[in-house]
Amino acid sequence: MKEYKLIAKTFSGLEDVLAKEVKRIGGKNVRRGKRAVFYDGDLELIYKSNYNLRAALRILKEIEHFNFKTVDQFYLKCKRIKWQNYFSVDQNFVINSVVVNSRDFRNSMFASLKVKDAIADYFRENFGKRPSVDTDNPDIIINVHIFQDNCTLSIDSSGESLHKRGYRVKQGDAPLNEVLAAGMIYLTGWLGNSDFMDPMCGSGTIPIEAAMIAQNIPAAKFRKEFAFQLWNDFDPLLWEKVTEPVEKREFRHKIYASDISGSNLLNAQTNARRALVFNKIQFSCTDFKNLDIDLNNATIVTNPPYGERLKENDLDGLYSMIGERLKHQYAGNSAWILSSSIDSLKFVGLKPSQRIDLFNGALKCKYNNYRLFEGKGK
């Protein structure tokens, strides 16, 4: 089967996590990039990447890479590509461009326009008509990446971002992205080999992703559509083979999820049912300061409020309470906290053994690990 150059996009800080995942599913020549992992693989691996990778936002298949000296040369090189190998004149398309440090292209819209012109002219000259552009619901998504005088053209195999797993029907005010949640869990090293807890679970993304990881449920098991299903080389039998049900891994430990808000907890339970992991998570509507769960050698991961809807004093008090509870009630475990409120994190009052920079949307966050030793510890 033909091999392709593939690119898996991710969030800043999750590149190593994603590279490990890519190797696990059979990616070759795996290289870590900035918010991306580059690797080689065939059509089956493209399908596997979309279906299995938890830390990937989208999977791109490279179709051309070239240097250019002028905008005209760029246009001609785009026009030389045999576009009918990738889609037909009856399909519609959209172009997404990223331009970095380019002398010739002032912005991404100009780059997209030039590629669109090249595609339209190619089809018109070879087939007498051209495919149309559809920005809302395109059949084919073409990705353009220009760095200085280098251009990489890729075709997007995912369509909608892969964080849209298909199980989330209910969400709270600030839902955590599923890809970020899975990446956070992988960064802890937890793979279902001990108990797990999220004491401020919101709409349940972290405990649901944990339950899916623990039981080896594919990331996109509940998702209905991918862009590659509209490619002219789509192989339904191969896709069927990739998505054949695998036996769930047995999970012998417990996952605890709680939240102070009853409506948040209801949303979390609804989502967990959709993801078929409801029976693996013990839910409770409890304020963390009153939460009393007997844990030992467990992993605690949480994404507390950052202050968008809390006054500063309340936020500092909240983080102080979190630190007190972790220190006095949850010694003997490992806790991880994601927050963009760097000042409030100091009120946790514990020394982090690890600090990782992550982004939650546009918010720069610290992802801190606290080893909760019995007694005073060192």
Image (tube, rainbow, N blue to C red):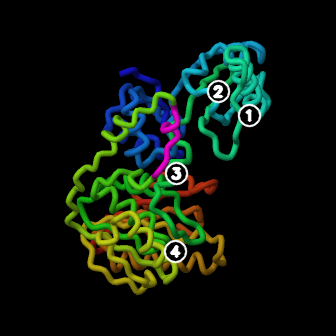
**Crowd around label 1: few <14 · some 14–19 · many ≥20 (10 Å):** some
Residue 108, numbered circle: 1
* Mark before the other along the chain sequence, 2 or 1: 2
Q: Is mark 3 on a helix, strand or loop?
A: strand
Q: Give the residue type at disc 4.
A: Tyr
Distance, label 1 to label 4, CA atoms, is: 42 Å
The magenta stretch spans which residues?
224-231
Quarter of the rendering containing residue 3: top left
- Rendered-image quadrant of the C terminus: bottom left
**Crowd around label 4: few <14 · some 14–19 · many ≥20 (10 Å):** many
* Mark before the other along the chain sequence, 3 or 1: 1
Distance, label 3 to label 4, CA atoms, is: 19 Å
**Crowd around label 3: few <14 · some 14–19 · many ≥20 (10 Å):** some
Q: Name the residue under label 4.
A: 319
**Crowd around label 2: few <14 · some 14–19 · many ≥20 (10 Å):** some
Residue lying at 40% horizontally and 33% vertically, measured from the top left:
235
